[in-house]
Amino acid sequence: MLLPNGMNRRHFMSHLAMGGAVTLGAGSFLNHLQANAAEVKKAQKACILIWLGGGPPTIDIWDLKPGSKNGGEFTPVSTKGDLQISEHMPETAKVMSDLSVVRSMSTREADHGRGSYFMHTAYVPNPTVVHPTFGSVVSYEVGAKQRKELEIPAFVSIGGGGMSPGFLGMSHAPFVVDSNGRIQNAEMDQASMGRLSKRLGILEAVEDTFIKSDRGDIGQAHKDVYSKAVNLMTSAQMDAFKTEKEPAAVRDMYGPATSAFGRSMLMARRLVEVGVPFVEVNFPGGWDLHQDVFNTLKNQRLPILDKGIAGLTADLKQRGLLEHTTIVCMGEFGRTPRINANTGRDHWAQSWSVMIGGGGLKGGRAIGETDADGMRIVSESYLPGDIWATIAHAMKIPLDTVHTSGRGRPMRLANGGTPIKGLIS
């Protein structure tokens, strides 16, 4: 079985060791359990990361500078919150009472690879250790420990490979699908399932013989992994990847049917709804806008981003999921306040913005401030660890959690970051 982005059969199977099964009773007792389970699932904490790879020009989206030579072509507009955002985000403006913007990020890593690593892990790259992306931390802390009923992976990445699970191991790596919910070469027709069933029957007989020979726990562990592989392929929870099952009116909330990003955002909601605690949605096309930044934003990027964020926020809220689901939208850095000779913006990590909301955090706020030209921060500045500590707080992950690297080194959750006070209810 070959899977995308370097994911092989062993990687695929490693996710399945984290799964579990639930046995229910019958009759009215079953109905009672199902009703309670639905309420418990609705209250489960989750995070959806919207990843704008390439580095979005946040000065043109979340922190506009009208009247400045760096201000560009766009006008800020009022929102339902106490802040203004780009005129080309009109649908998002309507839901900003539930979302906030941290306008004083200062990360100083303006290289794509290093910036992506820093923003995903809260640690700068180090040749002696590979730190886990925060989705893997959530998989380890929440998925493995709290979601015993979850039959699909606890960390799903849509439209991209995500980052490494580092020393937490491949069981917590992102489970990668495309915007249609497909896992490359992993779908089976009825005939293939029949052949698999026969082969598994033979395998079970061989494994049972091995287990009975009393050669340790390896045989039983191997059998358990393959059993969970079958459970994954046949689980009803796999329907969460099928956005076409949603009513047309719901799909339309997220943008046109041709929008891969819209489908991905809808899939994220469906995954959270079945209990997946961390979903990363990768925006297709990239944001490395060194030239023609305003036309690209106005005609290509922002209309799609706007519908996706607004649709997700409104849909989660209607379903009672927003107060338990944190949404964060960011890239690896921002882009230069100065506009270059190609009407573009270059890499800039000194003063930029991240959008964050839901999850019980305060909405409608602008946290932090940059000067009139967007060149420097004139308030408290924040690091990636502060963003992830805020999300950990919202998800009830203890902030004093310490993991241990493969070499025995203690690694603090979110690199010891501090939750952002202006967002904490």
Image: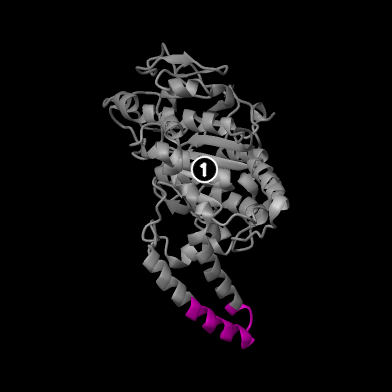
Three-letter amino acid code of the residue under disc 1? Arg
User: x, y (%) of residue 54?
Assistant: 38, 39
User: x, y (%) of residue 42?
Assistant: 64, 41
Residue placed furthest toward the left: 342
Rendering quarter of residue 38: top right
- Split into 4 quadrants, where in the image is the N terminus? bottom left
Horizontal placement of 171 versus 217: left or right?
A: left
User: x, y (%) of residue 371?
Assistant: 50, 18
Q: Nearer the viewer, residue 165 or 202?
A: 202
User: x, y (%) of residue 8?
Assistant: 42, 64
- Split into 4 quadrants, where in the image is the C terminus? top right
Residue at the (27%, 25%) spot, across then down: 341
Q: Nearer the viewer, residue 43 or 88?
A: 43
Q: Is residue 224 above or below residue 53?
A: below
Assess whether residue 215 is covered by the magenta stretch. yes
> How many tags in the picture?
1
Residue at the (35%, 36%) spot, across then down: 257
Assess whether residue 261 is covered by the magenta stretch. no
Q: Is residue 298 above or below residue 32?
A: above
> From which residue to which does the magenta span run?
201-219
Residue placed furthest toward the top: 67
> Within 10 angstroms of label 1, few (less than 14), some, or many (20 or more) residues?
many
Return the residue at label 1. Answer: 270
Q: Is residue 54 visible?
A: no
Residue placed furthest toward the bottom: 213
Q: Nearer the viewer, residue 332 or 279?
A: 279
